[in-house]
Image (cartoon, rainbow, N blue to C red):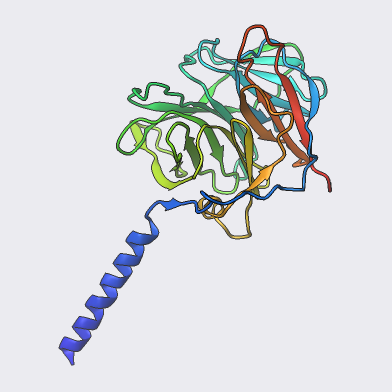
Amino acid sequence: MRQSLFIFLLLLYNHLLFCQKTSSKPWVNSSEDTEWVQNEEFESKGKGIGKVITMPEASGIAPSYSNADCIWAHNDSGDKSWIKLIDTKDASIKSILHLNTIKNIDWEDIECIKDQDTQRSYIYLADIGDNAGKRDFVTIYILIDEMMPFQKFLDANIQQTIHFTYPKKPRDAEAIMVDPLTKDIFIISKREKFVGLYSIKYPYKTEGIDTAKHIGTFPFNQVTAGSISPDGMEILISSYGRIFYWKRQEGESIPETLKRNPQLAPYYPIEPQGEAICWDILNKGYYTLSEKRRKQMPDPTLFFYKRKFR
């Protein structure tokens, strides 16, 4: 009897251990050979808001919770260490926030969430570009979403700094997303045949260098930006020429949502080098912005894709 009980408990332990191991293994999105369905919730053509002057290498945009009708934007590597506040009514530059204590090595994306614990909004600025795949670590800076006076230059105070690397080897990445419900950070690589999804769980490690966890793999590449809606229930991931859309179900985690097949969100006109996307603060649609790509081209246009049913 005792021997039978011992064997039963041993088998149960091995089963639970096996389930734990397999459940933590990275998944592969199953949509490689799927013809993606077009999402019908948004207008099929983006509305041009206006030319964004002095943003020839716009690489990231995010809605501001502290500045009505505005989004934050930044240029790619080589620009000064600042982020600019863009008015979504006419695409003009309203204010500039300086980050004097850090360098723009390769800023690639930006997110903004409202913290439900502190009731303050925070900007996540991702210095995660690594074209050569040689950086020892990459960095995400967290700063307060300041209320900016019109046509003023202010200095930003960095609240937290997260240095991290990836399992096995460095990765080039241009997209981060922050879940407003959990504050977990998600990073999507760019250059592999099938790009990877990585996560940094909250609370963040702010001492030393963290290692992002590999969560899963998508059957596409050239990912340039990502954004989670303010209510945490919708996800956009953009690549050159396509925008992928997911609807989160109640009680579902971000990785569980992204494991399902996406739809294609409207993306017309296709931008010359679309590298930035974000939701509207009221969840009425989403914005896109492109790099200039060639010097002879006009300044990039800020586009808005309005939701049909709100």
Q: Position of residue 195 (x, y in %)?
A: 46, 39
Name the residue at 74% across, 32% down.
Answer: 268
Residue 147 lies, with reference to residue 10, above or below; the image says above
- Image side of residue 7 versus residue 75, left or right: left
Q: Position of residue 175 (x, y in %)?
A: 53, 33
Q: Position of residue 51 (x, y in %)?
A: 76, 16
Q: Position of residue 286 (x, y in %)?
A: 72, 36
Q: Quadrant of residue 111?
A: top right
Q: Quadrant of residue 63?
A: top right
The quarter in which the N terminus is drawn is: bottom left
- Image side of residue 13 versus residue 285, left or right: left
Q: Nearer the viewer, residue 27 or 64?
A: 27
- Image side of residue 188 versus residue 60, left or right: left
Q: Nearer the viewer, residue 69 or 297?
A: 297
Residue sitting farthest toward the bottom = 1
- Image side of residue 67 versus residue 26, left or right: right
Q: Nearer the viewer, residue 240 or 156?
A: 240
Name the residue at 51% across, 15% down.
Answer: 77
Q: Quadrant of residue 162?
A: top left
Residue 126 lies, with reference to residue 117, above or below; the image says above
Report the number of discs: 0
Q: Nearer the viewer, residue 150 or 109?
A: 109
Residue 114 lies, with reference to residue 147, above or below; the image says below
Residue sitting farthest toward the top = 296
Residue sitting farthest toward the left = 3
